[in-house]
């Protein structure tokens, strides 16, 4: 079909083994990159089994790759950060009196397990055999009901 700037581009289907995508895009000028389109993309990863792992070098150029995915997770105590091995166990208090600081206690990561309000969390791992993710998040709020993390993610999907 012939399309012009501002026209819609809708598509749904399997983009790799175990990965389904639903595109709801608008065509834009070529200023935004190789495929001049912008809009929401819903990605469903079937049978995820996350493990913390480094991103393989060959995936750095894999297609499709998704950058700047906006993340805003509210994670209740005892639950995983979606698509990761990191579990928010709850809050702890470090120090005493006026020097006391509330910290989020995390398990399931090889990194430092305590985060204060405003601290960053970077997690890289494999979601399934052909899908890797890198989270770059910050603690925006925490209380007895949950931990709020906001930031971005990058997603690499291999067709193998």
Image (spheres, rainbow, N blue to C red):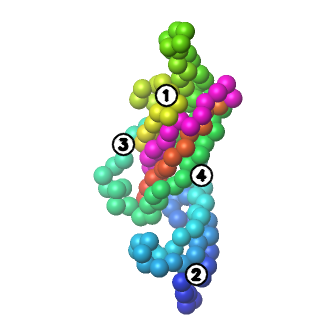
- Give the residue pinned by disc 1: 115
Of the image marks 1 and 3, the number of the one nearer the N terminus: 3
Which residue appears at 58% of the width and 63% of the height? 41
Q: Secondary structure at mark 3?
A: loop
Within the magenta stretch, is there residue 89?
no
Which residue appears at 55% of the width and 9% of the height? 97
Query: Are the residues tagged 3 and 2 within 8 Å (C-beta)?
Result: no
Residue closest to the far top: 96
Q: Quadrant of residue 88?
A: top right
Residue 124 visible in this rendered orientation of the protein:
yes
Report the front residue among 85 and 120.
120
Q: Is residue 108 above or below residue 148?
A: above
Q: CA distance from mark 1 to mark 4?
A: 30 Å
Report the front residue among 149 and 17.
149
Mark 3 or 2, closer to the camera: 2
Query: Are the residues tagged 1 and 2 within 8 Å (C-beta)?
Result: no
Q: How many circles with numbers are drawn on the protein?
A: 4
Mark 3 closeness class: few <14, some 14–19, many ≥20 residues within 10 Å: few
The stretch of residues the image draws in magenta is: 127-145
- Give the residue pinned by disc 2: 6
Mark 1 closeness class: few <14, some 14–19, many ≥20 residues within 10 Å: some
Mark 1 or 4, closer to the camera: 1
Query: Which circle marks residue 54 in the picture?
Result: 3
Residue closest to the far right: 145
Mark 1 or 3, closer to the camera: 1
Residue 123 x %, y %? 44, 39
Of the image marks 4 and 3, the number of the one nearer the N terminus: 4
Q: CA distance from mark 1 to mark 3?
A: 22 Å
Q: Is residue 92 left or right of residue 63?
A: right
- Give the residue pinned by disc 4: 46
Residue 3 x %, y %? 55, 87
């Amino acid at each position: 079909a012939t399309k012009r700037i501002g026209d819609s581009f809708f598509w749904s289907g399997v983009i790799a083994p175990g990965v389904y995508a639903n595109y709801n895009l608008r065509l834009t000028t070529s200023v935004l990159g190789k495929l001049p389109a912008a809009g929401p993309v819903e990605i469903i990863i079937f049978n995820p089994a996350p493990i913390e792992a480094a991103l393989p070098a060959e995936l750095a150029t894999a297609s499709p790759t998704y950058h700047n995915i906006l993340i805003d997770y509210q994670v209740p105590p005892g639950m995983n950060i979606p698509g990761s091995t990191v579990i928010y166990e709850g809050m702890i208090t470090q120090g005493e009196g006026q020097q006391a600081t509330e910290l989020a206690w995390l398990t399931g990561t090889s990194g430092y397990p305590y985060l204060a309000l405003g601290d960053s969390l970077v997690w890289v791992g494999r979601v399934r055999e052909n899908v890797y993710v890198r989270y770059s998040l910050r603690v925006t709020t925490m209380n007895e009901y949950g931990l709020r993390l906001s930031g971005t993610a990058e997603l690499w999907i291999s067709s193998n």
